[in-house]
Image (cartoon, helix red, strand yellow):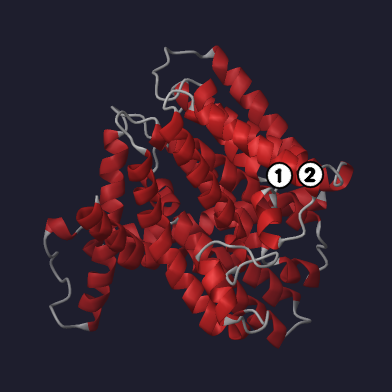
Amino acid sequence: MRAVFAFVTLGLAALAASMLFMLLLRAYPALHGDRGRLPGSPLPGTASNRVAGVSSRIGEEYELTTRQISASREKLFWNNIQILRLIAAYGIVYVHLEPVFIAIGAGSTIVDMLRFGTDLFLVVSGFLSAHVLSRPGRTAPAYLRDRAIRILPLYWLFTLAAFFAKDWVTGYGTPTVRELVMSMLFIPYGPYPILHPTWTLVIIVQFSLIMAACLAVSRRNAAYLASAFVVLLVLLGRIFQPENPALAAYTDPILIDSAFGVLIYKALGGEQRWPAQDRAVGWALLALGIGMAAVVLRPMFWADLPRLVGLGLPAALLLFGTVILERSGHVVRSASVNFVARCTFAIYLCHQFVNGASEKIVSLDPTSRVVHVLVLVATPLLVTIVAVFIFSYVEAPVTRHLKGHLG
C-alpha cells in the first residue's frame, strides 16, 4: 500500500507542478499580447519587457491551443487522449529517475509501476496514427512527410546534444561517430540509442513506415494489414531469436502496442459520431479500473508476465476507456492540459538532460532524504518548463516553417 500511495502522490505532484507553471504563465499580463499594454506595464527595453516578450511567445502557442479546443466542439480532436499523453510522458520521466527512488529506499516497485508509461505512449501513438491516416485523401507520402517534419528536426537536435554532452549529463560514456550516425538513422546498435529514452521512437518510426506501406497497398484495410504484419514480425523474432541489435529491436513484441492503438481506433468507429450513450460510461470506467489495477498490482503479483500482457494490454484498456468516455460526451477541454500535452515530444526528448542534472544534485548529498524527495517533486516541473520553451521557440516554429515550404 505504501508503494501505491507513493505512486499516486508522485502522479499528482507531477500534474500539480505542470499546471502551476501554466497558471503562472496565464497570470502574467503579457501572455495576452492582443489586449494591449496594461497601465503600469513595463516599457520597451526594460528587463521586465524582455520577460514579457518571452511570455508573449509562449502565450501565442497557448492561444492556438485554446482556439483548437474551441474548434474541437465541431470536429473530433480527442481531448481526453491528451491526458494519457501527459501521464505517459511523466511516467517515463520518473522511470529514468530510478537511482533517486532507490536512494530513498523505495526500491523498484514504483518504477516498475511507472514503466507502463512507455507502453501507453506507444498505444496512443498507434491510435493517433490511425486517426491521421483516416483523413480523406491522405496519401502515404504525405503522411511520411508530416511525420518526418514532426520528428526529425527536434530528434536530431537532441541526439547531437546528447552526443556532445553524454558523459557530462549521464555518465554513460562517450559515444562514437558511428553510433551517432546509426542513432540519427534509427538503426539500433545496442540496447539504446545515444539518447537512451528514444529507443521507443525507433518503434514509432518503424510502425509509421509499416502503416504508410500498407496504406499504399490498400487504404481500406491498411490498419489491419499493418497490425497483421507487426504480429508476423514479432513471431519471426520469437522463432529465430536474432542476435543482431537492429533485428532484435525491429521484432520486439512491444511493437504490438502500436497495433493495439490502431485496432482500438478502428473498433470504436474512428471519427464516426456516436449518439448519446450513457450506459457506455460503465464499460469505460470498468476498462479504466481494470487497466489501472493491473498496472499497480503487476510488480507485486505478476511481475514475470511478458511485457505485452503485463503492460501493453493494461495500457490498451486505459486508452479504450478514455476514448469511450469522450465518445459518450464526457470530455476534458482544459487549455492548460492540452497545451502541456502538445509539449510531450519535447518532454520526451529533454527529460534525460534534466534528470541527469537532478541526479548530480542528489549525488552532492547522497544521505539527505529531503533532497531526494525535493528532486522527485521538482524534476517534472523543471522538465515541463524546459519543454514549454523548447516547444514554443523551436519545435512549433520549425514545424510550421517546414510544413509551409514542404507541405
Crowding around mark 1 (Cα neighbors within 10 Å: few <14, some 14 to 19, many 20+) is many
In depth, the one of 391 and 129 nearer the eye is 129
In the picture provided, is 346 more to the left or to the right than 233?
left
Residue 101: percent from left, percent from top: 75, 66
Q: CA distance from mark 2 to mark 1?
A: 9 Å
Residue 335 pos. (x, y %):
36, 46
Residue at 81% over, 42% down: 297
Camera sees residue 248? yes
Q: Does residue 328 appear to the left or right of 93 in the view shown?
A: left
Amino acid on which the number 2 mark rests in the picture: Arg
Which label was assigned to residue 238? 2
378 is higher (above) or lower (below) than 320: below
The relative height of residue 45 versus residue 238 in the rendered view (above or below) is below
Q: Are marks 2 and 1 in contact (CB under 8 Å)?
A: yes
Examine the rendering and report whether any part of residue 354 can be seen. Answer: no
**Relative vertical location of residue 80 with respect to residue 276 in this rendering, above or below:** below
Instruction: Pick whichever, 284 or 229, lies toward us.
Output: 229
Q: Which mark is residue 350?
A: none
Dot 1 falls on a residue whose secondary structure is: loop
Q: Amino acid type of disc 1?
A: Pro
Mark 2 residue crowding within 10 angstroms, few (<14) / some (14–19) / many (20+) = some
Residue at x-position 32% and y-position 39%: 69
Identify the residue under disc 1.
253
Relative vertical location of residue 239 with respect to residue 114 in this rendering, above or below? above
Q: Nearer the viewer, residue 39 or 101?
A: 101
